[in-house]
């Protein structure tokens, strides 16, 4: 059997496409500014085979690396599978061999012990190399010019952690990459590895510590002084996995935590600060030092945003009933026992983006995606089953908000920011917009994917250029912009 289930994880913009293709000179409406010169890499989960189980989820799909290459106003598109150990084993067998999301006890016995990661979450550029990452395994290195998979990345054998986050943070001034891995010592272990790679891409530090429970730690933040892990009570359990159950279950009664240490310090210096119970965050926008204060800006919800993680924890909540806000947590590090002071910054949403130069520093603007109730019914699809339909630009200092909508029923993917060399210009955003060809809100595989180019500081004006792919692309997770100078200096040619 090689047929896909007709669940929310395989319909709408989650319809499997499975095409490894290249298209040159896409149709461009409007003019792409000449300064936009480089590649927009995108991580797209897309099953190479129908899943072993009917209740499979979009996050379990094979990673594809997609690229819009933009040069002199012309755009080429390419997409290829990341050739993970898992992808290659299944390609040879011509069927799925790996079972439920992050549960090796549901795999075909022929793949026991094989690496399960699908490298489907974030393209990461550091020190002249492109990686595809997913937090349940190590990164895979990709040739940025051919999109061929080169190898699994372990820092020339130096990395001890079995896992590598899909959300490392690069300091824009030092060029260092700060990263972590949770379940670093194996499935359901409490071990967290904290690593630093220098600007040349060498692993210069790896320290391990333990978290209070085995939580999914999807993202973390740095400031100029600190490394900070916000930890939320969505937990793994080995016995549940052994019985074939879900990796993650949200615990509504359990407290959250902030773990904070000097970013160049020792894990022995870690402070643990208790946070509110039951809340959930997958992405932080940014964090920065303000004297002794540390501000951490998060996309906070009152419970887990993924229905399958709520259901596994016995939580019955409709997706529409979730409450949340873009939220600032502030702590005073001059105190022996700092406490979290919380205040809302903006409307709920997720998939936040920052200009690279603002990472870990005071910042005056960011972008994220949200739902516009006036925008008509959203397109079904994406990792949580419902797509975003509004792009927000927020000034966190004063709460000033501007919004870009999309055509009725259209879906927005996470934008990437392209800086301008003109300090007076705020740069641009690139993002894929899926526009239904039929009535809005209907889970149809029939839509047209476009790449929109938007002035980053004038999002309310809408796109300055629309690039038509002529394709319906499967929902992306995260993306990354890499300018031409960096691409030309890549380690792989
Ligand atoms: Fe993420």
Image (cartoon, helix red, strand yellow):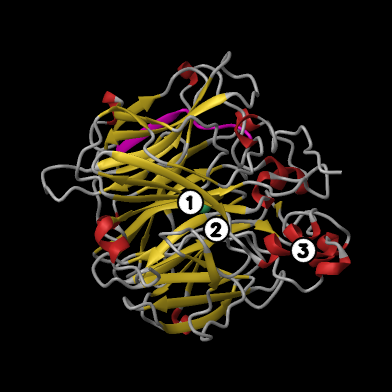
Labels 1 & 2 near each other (Cβ < 8 A)? yes
Q: Nearer the viewer, residue 331 or 94?
A: 94
How dense is the environment of label 2, judged by Cα within 10 Å: few (below 14), some, or many (20 and up)? many
Q: Position of residue 482 (x, y in %)?
A: 33, 56
Mark 1 within 8 Å of ligand 1, using the beta carbon: yes
Earlier sequence position, callout 1 versus callout 2: 2
Q: Label 1 vs label 3: CA separation?
A: 23 Å
**Mark 1 packing: few (<14 Cα in 10 Å), some, or many (20+)?**
many
Q: Nearer the viewer, residue 11 or 297?
A: 11
Q: Is residue 296 at all visible to an observer of this figure?
A: no
State which quarter of the image contains the N terminus: top right
Residue position marked by numbered label 3 in the rendering:
237
Q: Do the residues bearing badges 1 and 3 touch, measured as CB atoms within 8 Å?
A: no
- As measured in the structure, the alpha-carbon distance from the residue carrying label 3 to the one carrying label 2 is 17 Å
Is 266 positioned to the left or the right of 306 in the image?
left
**Do the CB atoms of the residues marked 3 and 2 lie less than 8 Å apart?**
no
Is any part of residue 461 visible from this angle? yes
Answer with the quarter of the image where residue 429 lies: top left
Say which mark, if any, is on residue 218: 2
Residue 382 percent coordinates (x, y): 59, 38
Check disc 1 and report its element: helix, strand or loop. strand
User: Residue beneath label 1, please?
Assistant: 283
Magenta range: 385-394
């Amino acid at each position: 059997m090689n047929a896909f289930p007709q669940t929310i994880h395989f319909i709408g913009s989650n319809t499997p496409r499975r095409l490894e293709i290249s298209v040159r000179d896409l149709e461009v409406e409007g003019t792409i500014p000449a300064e936009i010169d480089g590649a927009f890499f995108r991580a797209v989960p897309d099953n190479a085979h129908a899943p072993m189980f009917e209740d499979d989820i979009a996050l379990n799909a094979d990673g594809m690396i997609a690229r819009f290459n933009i040069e002199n106003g012309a755009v080429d598109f390419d997409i290829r599978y990341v050739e993970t150990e898992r992808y290659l084993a299944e390609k040879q067998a011509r069927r799925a061999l790996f079972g439920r999301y992050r549960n090796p006890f549901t795999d075909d016995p022929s793949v026991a012990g094989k690496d399960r990661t699908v490298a489907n979450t974030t393209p990461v550029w550091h020190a002249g190399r492109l990686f595809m990452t997913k937090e349940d395994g190590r990164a895979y290195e990709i040739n940025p010019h051919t999109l061929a998979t080169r190898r699994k990345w372990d820092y020339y054998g130096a990395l001890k952690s079995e896992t590598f986050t899909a959300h490392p943070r690069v300091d824009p001034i030092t060029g260092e990459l700060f990263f972590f891995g949770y379940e670093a010592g194996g499935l359901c272990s409490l071990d967290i590895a904290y690593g630093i790679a220098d600007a040349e891409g060498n692993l210069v530090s790896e320290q391990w510590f333990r978290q209070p429970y085995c939580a999914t730690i999807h993202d973390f933040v740095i400031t100029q002084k600190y490394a900070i892990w916000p930890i939320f009570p969505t937990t793994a359990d080995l016995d549940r996995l052994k019985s074939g159950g879900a990796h993650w279950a949200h615990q509504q009664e359990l407290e959250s935590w902030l773990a904070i240490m000097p970013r160049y310090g020792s894990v022995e210096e870690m402070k643990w600060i208790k946070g509110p119970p039951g809340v959930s965050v997958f992405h932080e926008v940014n964090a920065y030092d303000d004297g002794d204060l540390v501000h951490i800006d998060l996309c906070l919800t009152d419970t887990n945003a993924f229905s399958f993680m709520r259901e596994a924890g016995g939580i019955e909540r409709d997706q529409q009933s979730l409450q949340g806000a873009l939220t600032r947590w502030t702590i005073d590090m001059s105190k022996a026992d700092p406490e979290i002071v919380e205040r809302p910054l903006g409307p709920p949403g997720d998939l936040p983006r920052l200009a690279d130069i603002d990472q870990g520093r005071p910042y005056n603007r960011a972008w994220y995606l949200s739902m516009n109730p006036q925008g008509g019914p959203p397109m079904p699809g994406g990792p949580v089953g419902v797509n975003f339909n509004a792009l927000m630009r927020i000034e966190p200092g004063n709460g000033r908000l501007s919004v870009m909508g999309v055509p009725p029923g259209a879906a927005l993917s996470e934008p990437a920011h392209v800086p301008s060399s003109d300090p007076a210009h705020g740069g641009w955003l690139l993002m894929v917009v899926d526009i239904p060809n039929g009535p809005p809100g209907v889970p149809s595989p029939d839509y047209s994917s476009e790449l929109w180019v938007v002035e980053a500081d004038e999002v309310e004006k809408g796109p300055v250029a629309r690039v038509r792919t002529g394709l319906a692309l499967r929902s992306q997770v995260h993306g990354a912009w890499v300018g031409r100078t960096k691409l030309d200096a890549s380690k792989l040619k």
